[in-house]
Amino acid sequence: CLFILSILDEVYNISAKVRLFTQITIAILIIPIFKFPIFSYVPSKLDLLIITYLMVYIINVTNFIDGTDGALAITSLIFHISIVILSFFDGTIYPATIICIISSSILVAFLIFNKPDAKIFMGDTGSIPFGLINAYLLIFLFQKELFIFAIVLFFYPLLDITLTFIR
């Protein structure tokens, strides 16, 4: 759905309010794939709200770092390969592992064309779906109670974009 929304946005220049509403709606619809509580120390309704807004925030953080040569591909690739390595050490193949293997191959292929003096960019059509994947992976790590690991892996985009928003 976000991929289709991004294509429509490229063609028809959809307003930011409609895109935000759609992102929130998709985040709410995705919530049933997670096991709750994720944050056991907060009330369950607040947990749902935090996860919804976290997903929308990560989608947009990932979208914002697309404009820099290779930044989106490199940060996402490191993040996804780290989850594959974690899965290897756990001795379990999670759904997130399969997603990471597929997305890593896409990112490597994309990175070849996006190295400095980039010839192509993902644009919203690629970065927003990858943002959703990154949000899913962060929440996956939160569910495994690997909070520090999750934040460290995605620290650069979170810090960069958050400081830019604050400024």
Image (cartoon, helix red, strand yellow):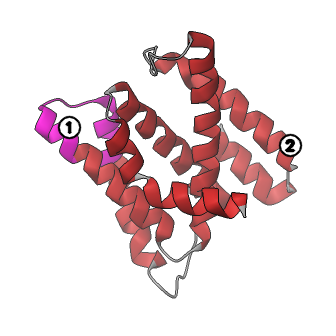
Q: Residue at x 41, y 46 (%)?
A: 151
In the image, 53 versus 102, the foreground residue is: 53
* Residue type at numbered disc 2: Lys
Residue 45 coordinates in the image, percent (x, y): 62, 13
Q: Is residue 91 magenta?
A: yes
Q: Is residue 156 left or right of residue 10?
A: left
Q: Are marks 1 and 2 in contact (CB under 8 Å)?
A: no
Q: Quadrant of the C terminus?
A: bottom right
Residue 14 coordinates in the image, percent (x, y): 85, 50
Q: From where the camera sits, is residue 122 visible?
A: no
Q: Which mark is residue 17?
A: 2
Q: From where the camera sits, is residue 92 visible?
A: yes
Q: What secondary structure prevails in the magenta region? A: helix
Q: Is residue 85 left or right of residue 110?
A: left
- The residue that label 1 is drawn on is 87
Q: Earlier in the sequence, mark 1 or mark 2?
A: 2
Residue 150 coordinates in the image, percent (x, y): 37, 43
Tell me: residue 81, above or below residue 37: below
Tell me: residue 138, above or below residue 94: below
Q: Which residues are magenta?
A: 85-101
